[in-house]
């Protein structure tokens, strides 16, 4: 896996809270800070952290196309490339690659209004990548996701930033009405 050389996690600890981790060494659910994490500091067992933690990187660490300032704790958006979640395949048209999807998980509601949000959406959508806007579930639950490519495609084609942001806001409002599903 190649990483963007100039980027480091620093004191970001977003994935140590957001992600569920099930391994022989650690069993934590979603949206609960890992017992080994010092919030805003980092992992207290970094040299001996579980192998799942060692091999995980969020989208910001991997994709140069994301802005440098988009470390998740700063942008308020956790970008994650994941295998298609069970049930999500049926929501999207046949032409999309259904092996992987990208979640833009909002850590703060106002992250949609932050710098570069629209540009990130159109970079991903223009590349044909299935993109889901997400809001965080409660501890132990999945995130609520809304497929973004179809609703934003015309706005993306026009490079209409305001429209992309407005559609994303609507998608977040729709996601907020979903019933969260347990992991
Ligand atoms: S969310 Fe990304 S930047 Fe933050 S700690 Fe995890 S891998 Fe590093
Ligand atoms: S063990 Fe360390 S790296 Fe892994 S989730 Fe916990 S704090 Fe994060």
Image (cartoon, rainbow, N blue to C red):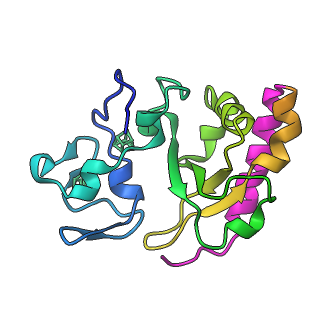
Question: Would you identify the image quadrant in which residue 17 lies?
Answer: bottom left
Query: 173 left or right of 155?
Result: left
Question: Would you identify the image quadrant in which residue 155 lies?
Answer: top right
- Point 66% across, 58% down: residue: 98
Question: Would you identify the image quadrant in which residue 122 lies?
Answer: top right
Based on the picture, tell me whether residue 110 belongs to the magenta stretch: no
- Point 49% across, 32% down: residue: 63
**Image location of residue 39, percent across then percent down:** 27, 48
Query: 136 left or right of 24?
Result: right
**Image location of residue 159, percent across then percent down:** 82, 25
- Point 74% across, 57% down: residue: 173
Q: Overall secondary structure of the magenta stretch?
A: helix
132 relative to 112, above or below: below
**Image location of residue 69, percent across then percent down:** 47, 25
Q: In which quarter of the image is the N terminus?
A: top left
Q: Residue furthest bottom?
A: 182
Ligand 1 falls in which quarter?
Answer: top left
149 relative to 91, above or below: above
Based on the picture, tell me whether residue 177 belongs to the magenta stretch: yes
**Image location of residue 129, percent across then percent down:** 67, 44
Query: 4 left or right of 152?
Result: left
Magenta residue span = 159-183
Q: Return the residue nearer the eye: 9 or 35.
A: 9
Q: Return the residue nearer the eye: 29 or 80.
A: 80
């Amino acid at each position: 896996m190649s990483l963007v050389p100039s980027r480091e996690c620093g004191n970001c600890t977003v994935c140590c809270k957001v992600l569920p981790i099930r391994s022989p060494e650690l069993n934590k659910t979603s949206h609960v800070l890992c017992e080994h994490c010092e919030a805003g500091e980092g992992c207290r067992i970094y040299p001996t952290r579980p192998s799942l933690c060692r091999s995980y990187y969020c989208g910001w660490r991997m994709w140069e196309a994301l802005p440098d300032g988009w470390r998740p704790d700063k942008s308020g958006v956790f970008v994650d490339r994941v295998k298609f979640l069970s049930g999500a395949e049926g929501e999207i048209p046949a032409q999309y690659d259904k092996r992987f999807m990208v979640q833009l998980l909002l850590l703060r509601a106002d992250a949609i209004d932050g710098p570069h949000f629209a540009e990130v959406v159109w970079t991903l959508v223009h590349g044909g990548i299935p993109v889901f806007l997400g809001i965080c579930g409660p501890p132990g639950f999945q995130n609520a996701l809304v497929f973004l490519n179809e609703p934003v495609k015309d706005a993306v084609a026009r490079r209409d930033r305001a429209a992309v942001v407005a559609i994303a806001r609507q998608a977040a409002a729709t996601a907020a009405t979903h019933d969260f599903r347990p992991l």
